[in-house]
Image: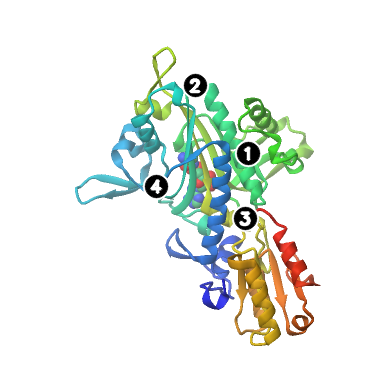
Amino acid sequence: MRLTQGFIPTIKETPNEAQITSHRLMLRAGLVRQTSAGIYAWLPLGLRVLRNIERIVREEQDASGAQELLMPTIQPAELWRESGRYDDYGAEMLRIRDRHERDMLYGPTNEEMITDLFRQSVRSYRELPKIFYHIQWKFRDEVRPRFGVMRGREFLMKDAYSFDLDHAGAVISYRKMMLAYMRTFRRMGLKAIPMVADTGPIGGDLSHEFIILAPTGESQVFYDAAFEEIDYLSEGAGGFSHDSPADLERFFQEMTSYYAATDEKHDTAKWDQVAPERRREGRGIEVGHIFNFGTKYTKSMNTTVTTPDGKPVFPEMGSYGIGVSRLVGAVIEASHDDAGIVWPDSIAPFRAAILNLKVGDAACDALCARLYEALGADALYDDRDDRAGVKFNDADLMGHPWQLVVGPRGAVAGKVELKRRVVGMSGGDRVEVSPEDALAQIFANSDRRA
Ligand code: 5CA
């Protein structure tokens, strides 16, 4: 995209409505704008990041065997009256009445709707297990929406739902999702820790939250230092297979053998058993949450399948959420410096930025055009007739993983300056290389869409 033709309204001043870094940077770099309290419009740069996060989430869900579908945002109240949650959910639910006086709601989550879709068509144990997911906007009328997209009222969630014949099967589905989640977050450059968590209005007794450590996080967390040391997926994400219950068990054991809990589930007796020098206490951002709640919804919504001996049973369910829009903020909290955002390659809005330091200079224009052609739509070409300093600052603020800087002297000599954007090195480390070498280095990174 040519910057002169794009819509990336960056802001120099620090917006005073924003309390945390990610919110400030998202406004300043032109990713989002607030349209109502806790509701945001995604501008082109922000939308590209959101789509990249969605792509990774989708690929890892598909790899786990989950099937994608898409449920609507607006739901009928009857389904929620059946499960008993219509009244329980309280003021967080946005209730709507249509022109025929029917009670509707903007979905805060989809357990009821997926159970209804399931019971309309699935009759036999032969059709199990099943995991469905969708990536859809949710609405929760939070009392205090804050921190930008981190705690919005409207937000994008990936929610998956599993159906199994019995508890043993449900445990396998739960572990599959845990593996898919660890791979998903890792591909975004995040180290997430699965922590024993409270189940709240979703219900059930087996639950983990996936927490990214950050001082601005809303959760108080307690964990064993082992989580800082061990890179569970390093021996190749291929080390564990979704198709092998033994692998899944080994993976689950490894992930849960050390103490890690949020404050709601903090167990001081168990905490006392952790060696004092290994105890870590801090703040974290919840980027995902998985639940096993057995037959809570299949029972209340009278959903059965027949077993091999012809008897009806209530299938066991789980639900599995990832905060897709929250992740945009969470990644920024985990990866930024004084100059701006530092995107991991996999989700950066553009693979690289081309900075033309002298627009109108024949050699600069020609070399930039060549680079832009080679990188295609995955590059942002700063073709503004502006000062070099403005371009450097904006490129650092927007956080492109690579900057290709083209100045008049270098252009004549057939050279560009290549800069890798890393945390804490906003100012410098531009290396002069040939355009071919620069492109080769940029293309060497593989976790990008084609
Ligand atoms: N039905 C279950 C799992 S599918 C569920 O709704 N779980 S949840 O309530 O924990 O939400 C899942 C994820 O959505 C959370 O881990 C969090 O990352 C994200 N999320 C929840 N509330 C908000 C919010 N107000 N703003 C942004 N993201 C949110």
User: Which circle, 2 or 3, is nearer the viewer?
Assistant: 2
Counting residues from the start of the chain, the first of labels 2 and 3 encountered is 2
Q: Which label belongs to residue 331?
A: 3
Q: Position of residue 387 (x, y in %)?
A: 66, 84
**Residue 396 in the figure: left or right of residue 161:** right
Q: Which label belongs to residue 166?
A: 2
Q: Position of residue 444 (x, y in %)?
A: 73, 58
User: Which circle, 4 or 2, is nearer the viewer?
Assistant: 2
Residue at label 1? 194
Residue at label 4? 92
Where's the C terminus, which quadrant? bottom right
Kindly identify the amino acid type of the residue bearing the numbered disc 3: Val
Question: Mark 2 to mark 3: distance in Å?
Answer: 37 Å
The answer to whether marks 3 and 1 mark residues whose Cβ atoms lie closer than 8 Å is no
Question: Mark 4 to mark 1: distance in Å?
Answer: 26 Å
Q: Residues within 10 Å of mark 1 (few under 14, many from 20)?
A: many
Between 93 and 72, the one lying in front of the other is: 72
Kindly identify the amino acid type of the residue bearing the numbered disc 2: Asp
Mark 1: secondary structure? strand
Counting residues from the start of the chain, the first of labels 3 and 1 encountered is 1
Mark 2: secondary structure? loop
Between 43 and 368, the one lying in front of the other is: 368
Question: Mark 3 to mark 4: distance in Å?
Answer: 26 Å
Counting residues from the start of the chain, the first of labels 2 and 1 encountered is 2
Counting residues from the start of the chain, the first of labels 4 and 2 encountered is 4
